[in-house]
Image (cartoon, grey):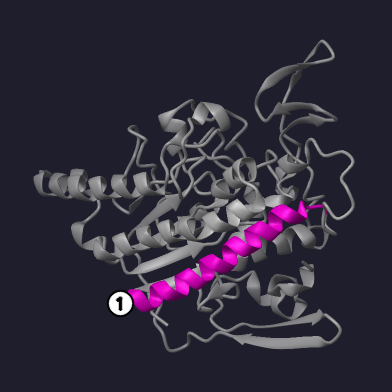
Amino acid sequence: MGANKYCPLNTACQAHSASMDICTCKCRALLSVGFIVSWVLSVSCDTLPPCVFPAIYNFGDSNSDTGGISAAFEPIRAPYGEAFFHKSAGRDSDGRLIIDFIAERFKLPYLSAYLNSLGTSYGHGANFATGGSSIRRQNETIFEYGISPFSLDMQIVQFDQFRSRSGELYKEAKDASDRAKLPRPEDFSKALYTFDIGQNDLSVGFRKMNSDQFHAAMPDIINQLASAVQHLYQQGGRAFWIHNTGPIGCLPVNLFYVHNPAPGYLDEHGCVKGQNDMAVEFNRQLKERVAKLRAELPEAAVTYVDVYAAKYGLISNAKNQGFADPLKVCCGYHENYDHIWCGNKGTVNKTEVYGAPCKDPSVFVSWDGVHYTQGANQWVADHTQNGSLTDPPIPITHACHRQ
C-alpha cells in the first residue's frame, strides 16, 4: 500500500489539515497503477452551524483509555503520562490521547474513566474504554495475553447502568455542586458518542486463527460494534464518531522478534504487510457496515473516521513531518532479543536494566512499542478531526449533522 494513496501526504492539502477549523478542504491524490487516477474530495460546511456537544461518551481500548484498566487492575506507572500530566494519568502514552484532543476541541474536561472511583467528575461525559478491550468477548483472562474483561458489550452494559444510576443521583442531589459532577439527563441525547476499538480483535485473530478463519469471523465482530451503536441510538444517542483500526503491522512490537524476515513479509516502510492487509479488510467491512447504519438509524449522524490512513500516512512520511524513525521505540529497552518494557526493570547479561524513556518523546511516533506518543496522537487528531479523512467528509465540529 503506497503512502501516496492518502490525502495527509498531499502537499496541496497539508497546509490546511493542521487546522481543525477547516470546513472546506480539497485533496488530490495521484496513484500510478499503469495509469494515473486523480480525484478530488471537497468538503463544505459553510451553511451548517457548529455542534455544541455538552458531553462525550467513549468506548474503546488502550488507544482511548483514560484510566479504566489502571483503576481496575495494576495502576499504570511513570514514566507514562509525565510529558503532559507530569505524573502517571492512567493513559498508555507519555501524555494525551486522541480522545483528550477531542475533548479539548470542544473545550470539555478530559473524560473520567467509568471504573475510576476517586477524583472523578462525570458532568461532561464518561469513558468506558479499557486497555486490552476487544469488540468481541474473548475466552481468556487479562493475565494471559492482556485482553481486558471489559469487552464492548460489557462497556455498553456499564453505560446503561451509568445512565440509570446517574439519573437517580441527579434527582436526589441537594445542591448544585453535587449535580455538577453528574450528567444532566437531557444531555445524553445531545452528546457525542465515540468509538476506538478493534485493534485487539485483530491481535487475537492473528494469535488464534488462520487467515480464512479470521476472514470468516470479521462480519460477526463488526456486527457486534454495529449492535452497540444501535443500542445507544435506542437510548437516545444521535451523534456517533467511529474510528477504524490502525495499521497494526506498523507497531514495533510486531518486529521485536523478527530479525531476518522473508521477502515480502514487510512492506516498503518496514511494516508487517499481512497484518496491515487484514486491518485494511477489517476497515473495508466496517465502512460498509457504518454506511448501512446510516440507513437503519434515520435520525443519527454516523461518521466513519479513517484513522488507518492518518497513522499510515504519518508512519510512511515521518521524517518529513518532523518525526524520527517511526519503528523505533521511545520508552523501554529493546536490544536484539532482550526486551525490558517501558517503566520496568530487568536483567540483561547479569546487569540490571531500566526501561527508560527517550530524551525527547515529542519526535517519536511509538511510545512503548504498542502505543503512540502524545506527539503522534496530536498529529493523528489534527488530520482526522478536520474532515479530510472521514465519511461523510465533515469535521468533528459538525459531527451532529446528518449527511
Q: Amino acid at mark 1?
A: Glu
Quadrant of the rendered image containing residue 309: bottom right
Residue 94: tell me if it is visible.
Answer: no
Query: Does residue 236 appear to the left or right of 110 in the view shown?
Result: left
Q: Residues within 10 Å of mark 1 (few under 14, many from 20)?
A: some
234 and 374: which is toward the camera: 234
Q: In the image, is residue 224 above or below residue 46?
A: above
> Which residue appears at 26% of the width and 60% of the height?
188
Q: Is residue 326 magenta?
A: no
How many discs mark residues in the rendered view? 1
> Which residue appears at 59% of the width and 58% of the height?
215
Magenta residues (range)? 270-298
Secondary element type, mark 1: loop
Query: Does residue 121 appear to the left or right of 264 in the view shown?
Result: left
The x, y position of residue 57, in whole percent, is 37, 55
Q: Which residue is mark 1?
A: 299
Query: Does residue 234 appear to the left or right of 354 in the view shown?
Result: left
Residue 39: tell me if it is visible.
Answer: yes
Q: In the image, is residue 256 above or below residue 55?
A: above
Q: Is residue 279 magenta?
A: yes
The x, y position of residue 152, in whole percent, is 41, 49
